[in-house]
């Protein structure tokens, strides 16, 4: 099993997303939770804590707000992992991306948009942390939600659980195309995924436009579409070959060494473009 990096080395080290993923990789969920607190405190990023306990489990969500205005964009990345997995792509690198973006926005905050970073616990327990967050916290002003999953392997961005065209979805795709990305080539929009999910579903159940955001290898795009939409009947069910990044998903192979800095950078750039466009948009 991969060994965790000494926490102080991460706190004092570089702040790119893959380096920050070392905060969480190969730690227990309790240690991952504490590492997020340690980083936010160390970097002086103001945050609020939302502890929850239910019959399903317990944990602590964290929230960081940057910018101002009545419109709120929620960006979420869960900090827990399944037992037995180092949890690098699921979901340490996504946490690293959002921590890096939060620091960027702390230096240059949007003026007509609030970006709310949410780091939920217990996503692996049926989005428990996000469900408790949505139940307990006010949702007024939220224009949309993106939850980051599997953001460290690949070169093509994917917006998923997006079966219907909404103004929020149009804003997202416009921002990606401003970067030179092209639909069905360097980014993809996928409808509801029946088996896999993430924290955005807790917000969608409350009537808020909410989607997943991932990055995948472009060469595997069609194979992945077949796999996620119908995993039991796709060609991979018979062959046993699972396309990346699902080949390491929830396994001991989800290691830091599999992460591609360029993949994380692509997600970061996409989020920066989305924040810029929404900040410029008329309320």
Image (cartoon, rainbow, N blue to C red):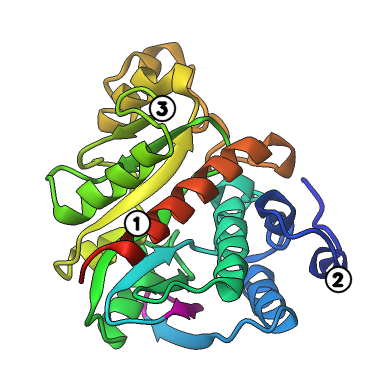
Q: Secondary structure at mark 3?
A: loop
> Residue at point 80% right, 57% down?
4
Q: Is residue 220 left or right of residue 278?
A: right
Q: CA distance from mark 1 to mark 2?
A: 36 Å
Q: Picture coordinates of residue 90 (x, y %)?
A: 54, 49
Q: Is residue 105 left or right of residue 41?
A: left
Which callout, 3 or 2, points at the residue further toward the start of the chain?
2
Q: Nearer the observer, disc 1 or disc 2?
A: 1
Q: Can residue 219 be spotted in the picture?
A: yes
Q: Can residue 152 be spotted in the picture?
A: no
Q: Is residue 180 left or right of residue 21?
A: left
Along the line of sight, which residue is nearer the eye, 6 or 283? 283
Residue highlighted by disc 2:
8
Q: Residues within 10 Å of mark 3 (few under 14, many from 20)?
A: some
Residue highlighted by disc 3:
186
Q: Picture coordinates of residue 165 (x, y %)?
A: 13, 45
Q: Nearer the observer, disc 3 or disc 1?
A: 1
Q: Is residue 56 magenta?
A: yes
Magenta segment boundaries in residue numbering: 55-67
Residue highlighted by disc 1:
277
Q: Quadrant of the C terminus?
A: bottom left
Q: Quadrant of the N terminus?
A: top right
Q: CA distance from mark 3 to mark 1?
A: 19 Å
């Amino acid at each position: 099993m991969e060994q965790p990096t000494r926490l102080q080395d991460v706190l004092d080290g570089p702040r790119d997303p893959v380096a920050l993923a070392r905060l969480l990789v190969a730690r227990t969920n309790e240690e991952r939770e504490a590492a997020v607190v340690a980083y936010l405190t160390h970097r002086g990023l103001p945050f609020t804590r939302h502890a929850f306990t239910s019959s399903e489990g317990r944990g602590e969500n964290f929230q960081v707000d940057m910018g101002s205005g009545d419109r709120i964009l929620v960006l979420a990345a869960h900090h827990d992992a399944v037992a037995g997995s180092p949890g690098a792509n699921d979901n340490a690198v996504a946490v690293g991306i959002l921590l890096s973006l939060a620091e960027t926005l702390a230096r240059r905050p949007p003026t007509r948009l609030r970006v709310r970073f949410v780091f939920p616990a217990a996503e692996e327990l049926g989005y428990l942390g996000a469900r408790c967050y949505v139940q307990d916290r006010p949702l007024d002003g939220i224009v949309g939600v993106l939850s980051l999953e599997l953001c460290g392997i690949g070169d093509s961005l994917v917006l998923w659980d997006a079966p219907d065209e909404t103004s929020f979805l149009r804003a997202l795709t416009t921002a990606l195309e401003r970067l030179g990305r092209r639909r069905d080539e360097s980014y993809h929009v996928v409808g509801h995924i029946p088996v896999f999910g993430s924290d955005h579903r807790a917000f969608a159940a409350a009537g808020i436009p909410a989607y997943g955001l991932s990055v995948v290898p472009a060469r595997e795009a069609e194979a992945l579409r077949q796999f996620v939409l119908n995993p039991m009947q796709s060609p991979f069910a018979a062959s046993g070959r699972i396309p990346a990044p699902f080949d390491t998903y929830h396994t001991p192979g989800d290691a830091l060494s599999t992460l591609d800095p360029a993949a994380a950078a692509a997600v970061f750039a996409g989020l920066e473009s989305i924040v810029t466009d929404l900040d410029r948009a008329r309320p």
